[in-house]
Amino acid sequence: MNIKSILLFLMCITLQKVAAKEIDTTAAISIGGIQQFISIKGKSTDNPILLYLHGGPGAAVSSHSDKVTQRLEAHFVVVHWDQRGSGKTIALNEPDALPTIEVMKQDAEEVFSYLLTRFDRKQIVVLGNSWGTVLGLHLAEKFPVKVRSFIAVSPIVQHKKSQEITLELLQNHFNKNDNTKALEQLSTVKIPFENAEQMLILHRWETVHNGEDFPDEQYKQYLSYFVGWSSQWMPLYQQLYGIDLEKQVLELECPVYVLIGDKDLTTHHEITKAYFDVLKAPQKELFWLEDVGHNIPGVAGDRMQEIIIENIIND
C-alpha cells in the first residue's frame, strides 16, 4: 500500500469517526404517563448537552429549530422538547386533562433525568425562554449540581406586577398621543386577565408602542388564535400570577445568564433587571439586546446564539 493509499485510508477512518459522533434524531419518549416528542441535533455527541425549554406555554419550536438554535449545534448537543400539549407531542396522545405548572415541572424533571441517562452525563445546560424559564428555574433548584448553567431568556419574574406596569405605561403613552382607539381597548383590560381578548389587547398595543403596525384585520386573526389557545392554557397561565421571584428565589447554585430585550414589555425589562441585581449565584451575567422586545429567539435568534457561543460555552 503506497503512501497516497494510506493517507486516503486514514482520512476515511477520520471522517467515519467524525460522522459517528454527529447526531440528528427524534424520539417519542414516555414522560409523565404520555408520549412526548424530542429532537436532538449536534455536530458531536462529545459536546455539552443543552436542553431548550420553549415558551408559550404551548409554543414549541422543534419544527423550526433551525431558525432558533442551528448555530448552537456546532457547540452543543441541542435538545428540543415539545412539552405536554405542544407541537408534535399533541399528535402522539389522546386529549388529556388541562396541564398545571406542577405537572409540567414534573415532566421537565423526567426529561432532564432521561437526558442525563441517555448521554451518560453529570450536567446539562438549561436554556429557558419566557414560560420556559419557569421550568428552567425549577430544574436549577431541583438539580443544583446537575445544571451546568441556566440561561434565562426573557424570564418571568413578577408576572402580575409586570403587566400592571405595562398597562399603566401604555395608557399614559397613548393618552399623550391622543389615541382614543388604544385607550378604549386598554380600558377593558383587567390584571389578572379575565379572558383571551384582554391578553391580546395588551399584546396589540405593546406591539404598536414598540413601533410596529397591528391593524384591525391582524387583530381579528390573532383573536381567533388567542381564544383557541386560552381554552387549553388559560388555567395554567393564571397560575403564573403567583410567581414573584424576588420573594421566592433569591439564590441559585449554578451560573446564571439572563438575556433581556430593551423593549420587552411582556416580561418587563425593568423588573427583570431589578431581580438580576438581587439574585445570588456563583457566576451571573446580564445581556441586553437593543431594539428587541419579548420574542428574542424569534426576532433576534442569531444574536441570542452569538451571546451564548461567545460567553457561555466554557463556563
Image (cartoon, rainbow, N blue to C red):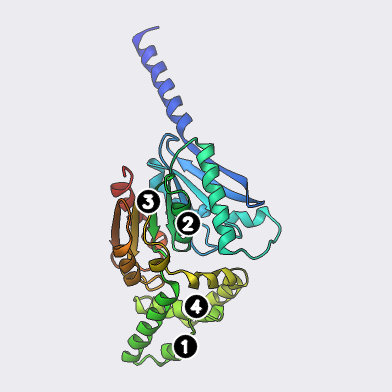
Position of 32 with respect to 193 (left or right) is right
Answer above or below: position of 70 versus 83. Answer: above
Within 10 angstroms of label 3, few (less than 14), some, or many (20 or more) residues?
some
- Tell me the distance, in whole angstroms, between the alpha carbons under discs 4 and 3: 37 Å
Q: Amino acid at mark 1?
A: Gln
The structure residue drawn at horizontal position 46% and vertical position 90%, both measured from the top left corner, is 187
Residue 255 image point, x, y percent? 34, 50
- Tell me the distance, in whole angstroms, between the alpha carbons under discs 3 and 2: 12 Å
Point out which mark residue 185 bears: 1
- Residue toward you, 192 or 79: 192
Within 10 angstroms of label 2, few (less than 14), some, or many (20 or more) residues?
some
Point out which mark residue 253 bears: 3
Residue at the extreme top of the image, as rendered: 1
Within 10 angstroms of label 4, few (less than 14), some, or many (20 or more) residues?
some
**Helix, strand, or loop for circle 4?**
helix
Foreground mark, 4 or 3?
3
Q: Earlier in the sequence, mark 2 or mark 4?
A: 2
**Helix, strand, or loop for circle 1?**
helix
Image quadrant where residue 96 sits: bottom right
Q: Quadrant of the C terminus?
A: top left
Foreground mark, 1 or 2?
2
